[in-house]
Image (tube, helix red, strand yellow):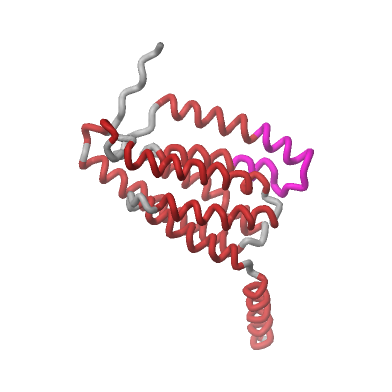
Amino acid sequence: MSIFLALDISAAFAQYWQATSRLEIGAVLTGFVCVWLAARESIWNFPVAIVSCVFYAVLFWHTHLYADWGLQGFFIALSGYGWYEWLYGGRDETQLGVTHALGREWLLAAAFAGVFTLGFGYYLRHHTDAALPYIDSFTTAGSLAAQYLLTRKRLENWLLWVLVDLVYVPMYWFKGLYISSVLYFLYLALAAYGYWQWRAELHRHPARARVPEPAAG
């Protein structure tokens, strides 16, 4: 009986592997490299991110995760913005250094996430065949907020990524995107590694630990 069970498992795995989209494999590989490069503070994370977003945009369209599909366009735009900011966003147009997030950035991120999740989730639920509309919308909003903080080299972007990845792992598994689900599990480890790396970098330059809040007009 155990032999037949092993054969059934092998056949099921082979069937899944044959059905797995090459797009998902490409998205997984480039996505992993992108996050690893970001954790290492490498500017090359942005061009790799753009390639990964193109792969995922096509993949999400076919799996009816429309919020995540639209997210890829924003990620491409933010990657271009981050590319420029990391090169010239520091003082006197120098390279940007790691800093803590501002209080107003946390407030804006929380407000954006709440409004986007409820508003876009409602739209997806009532006007599309989207799967998991509110969860999909929440991960989209959280990802956008985390990506923006990453473009500004805010240390806390990694904490937001941990939260988002904890939701992505079961969501992708539920949708049958098993490779992507495993990838996002690995992202949890990379996010923790990125936080550790960036915090160490910040401790080496304590003078820039927190940028000043802009004065009220």
Q: Is residue 135 magenta?
A: yes
The quarter in which the N terminus is drawn is bottom right
The magenta stretch spans which residues?
Answer: 118-138
The quarter in which the C terminus is drawn is top left
Number of marks in the rendered image? 0
Q: In the image, what residue occupies the spot 59% across and 44% down?
A: 71
Q: Is residue 133 magenta?
A: yes
Q: In the image, what residue occupies the spot 49% across and 63% down?
A: 29
The location of residue 40, given as percent across then percent down, is 33, 53
Q: Could you say which is closer to the camera, residue 12 or residue 23?
A: 23
**Quarter occupied by residue 106:** top left
- Quick check: 66 above or below 183? above
Left or right placement of residue 175 versus residue 210 in this view: right
Q: In the image, what residue occupies the spot 78% across and 39% down?
A: 127
- Quick check: 23 above or below 105? below
Left or right placement of residue 77 versus residue 88 in this view: right
